[in-house]
Image: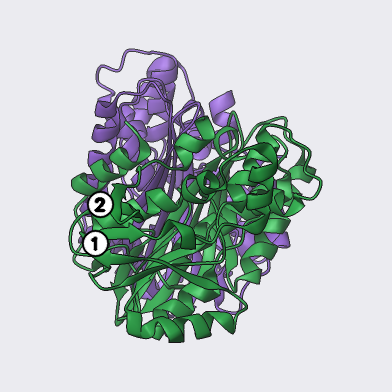
Chain colours: A purple, B green
Amino acid sequence: MGERALIELARRICVKGPKVEVGIGDDAAAIDIDGRYLVVTTDMLVASQHFPTAATAEQMGAKAVVANLSDLAAMGAEPLGLVFSVGLPRQLKVEFVKRMIRTMDATARKYGAYVVGGDLDESEEIIIAGAAFGVARKGRLLTRSGARPGDIIAVTGSLGAASAGLRILLEKLPSGGYEELVRAQLEPIARVREGIALAKCGHVTAAIDVTDGLASNLWQISRMSGVKLILDLKRVPVHPLVEEFAERRGLDAGEFALFGGEDFELLFTARPEGWRGIRWALKRMDTSATAIGRVERGRGVYIEKDGKLEELPDRGYEHFRRA
Amino acid sequence: MGERALIELARRICVKGPKVEVGIGDDAAAIDIDGRYLVVTTDMLVASQHFPTAATAEQMGAKAVVANLSDLAAMGAEPLGLVFSVGLPRQLKVEFVKRMIRTMDATARKYGAYVVGGDLDESEEIIIAGAAFGVARKGRLLTRSGARPGDIIAVTGSLGAASAGLRILLEKLPSGGYEELVRAQLEPIARVREGIALAKCGHVTAAIDVTDGLASNLWQISRMSGVKLILDLKRVPVHPLVEEFAERRGLDAGEFALFGGEDFELLFTARPEGWRGIRWALKRMDTSATAIGRVERGRGVYIEKDGKLEELPDRGYEHFRRA
């Protein structure tokens, strides 16, 4: 049973409390606390699964913070703090732990959040389980389930860099000229300010962070919103270095952009009348946004090819990593 | 470097945010959110470290919830919800996971909280990293640092059962007649209502949950409050079955009560004038409370023996388990 099926199992089993506005199955949970939402998420990184062997203490610490804050960003929440339960092998040097904690602290503060607590245990391999919490105003919460027919589909920044960087690391390819791709994998950025801005503008109907890969994340919005998503393949903003890297290696750049994942960009749907304002608000933060498709009545995720609709495979990062 | 030294390291490294009332180093963190405190904690259970091999899916799920809620109880906070990052070995049966999640849900709800989110990953052994969050009113937050000279020291319930139960399980002793001790180890109870009542009564100055063992937890209050604690050994409420078990096996019941840990009782200090009210409030919940010592000016934890003070060793559960 895959992760998604198990999460769906948990969603069916667990009773949703009366104050729980959003429970299991979205980027984060939202609980009503007197007029606003407390937004909470958890994300675990297991060394053997999530980090290339090249990853440093600093990169592990930073990524653990970013992965959690990115989930808050996808809800449009303002982050307050994080707690970490960390499992460490007995033989690990104290210096390693120090460097990891220092980076966690610095990274959290870069996003206006603080590391406020933790638990430390012995474990076979390095495990960093984080939980992040923040607040969102009522009416300003972004979920995966609000996309409506007529909306446009859009994404911040560009895609494919993190997974191309992973490929370089896993296959030990020369990284000369592609340092930016490697950095995208090891030192990702969470779109926290962008998420808050999208929630504030009022025209965004659904959002998710691109962690599993564009295709897989589109499928999640489609399923949770009960709509059909049509992707305009040629408008997907592939990172320019990914194009170059793929061409030189005889690979398909689109594979990275569609199925690569871990870019931590925000994928969202919005009412068309809000699009100008959204682009303007993001531009003020030096963040680009690209319209990449449209929402229709129906189910599923499709690409338009020669006037015909072709279903986009629902496969993501997990598949990509094992390939 | 032990867990406590690493937590102290993290406390020194991490900047305490302006809204953070209580940061790293207490049972939970408290963050000011418009007039009240959001209280957050995290606790990780690693199968090989925290569960006897006899532990079932239900017991693992329940203990993960209780360990986290107990930290909120020690702050006097009202729990709202929990999130869990769970690492599972690939070969684990889905049925096991189902049973674990069902018990997590049921246990959380027993305490008025809900499981609102999670992350699932593959790992070598079962790992359950939970985070619990709740709220506390201003002026009603219990910390480890408020004990003052003149206070009495008290504890809820009785001590030693969980560690005696662990001994029975680890040494595969016959459990006939001692089922309650085994249950105390595998299915502990969090003193959530009691914590809220203690916070409400206004006379409690410090609190901590007994997870490391009475001695170790007394030392933590002493250090964080900057006071001397004097324990009246003969008043420590040892669980009656522990007395019987120890006598029959030629063991020292006091060892379990002082150094055993994982009882999840609340150890607290209070102004003497509040003691009657505290006992009465707890009695209404069918929970006993016993005065076990006094707070004085100075440093350290002592027991009084023949009119002389003898320092109580600062060793706890970790030591006990490895012994």
Label 1 sits on residue: B225
The three-letter code of the residue at mark 2 reads Gly
* Residue B141 spot, x, y in % from top left: 34, 74
The three-letter code of the residue at mark 1 reads Ser
Q: Quadrant of residue B152?
A: bottom left
Image vertical order of residue B224 relative to residue B167, above or below: below
**CB-based contact (under 8 Å), mark 2 and mark 1:** no
Label 2 sits on residue: B300
| Residue under the point 31% across and 52% down | B302
Classify mark 1: helix, strand or loop. helix
* Residue B312 spot, x, y in % from top left: 35, 47
Residue A97: give its label.
Answer: none
Residue A115 visible in the shown view: no
Q: Using the numbered discs, state the Cα–Cα distance from disc 2 to disc 1 in whole angstroms.
A: 11 Å
User: Depth-wise, is mark 2 or mark 1 nearer the camera?
Assistant: 2
* Residue A260 spot, x, y in % from top left: 49, 35
Classify mark 2: helix, strand or loop. strand
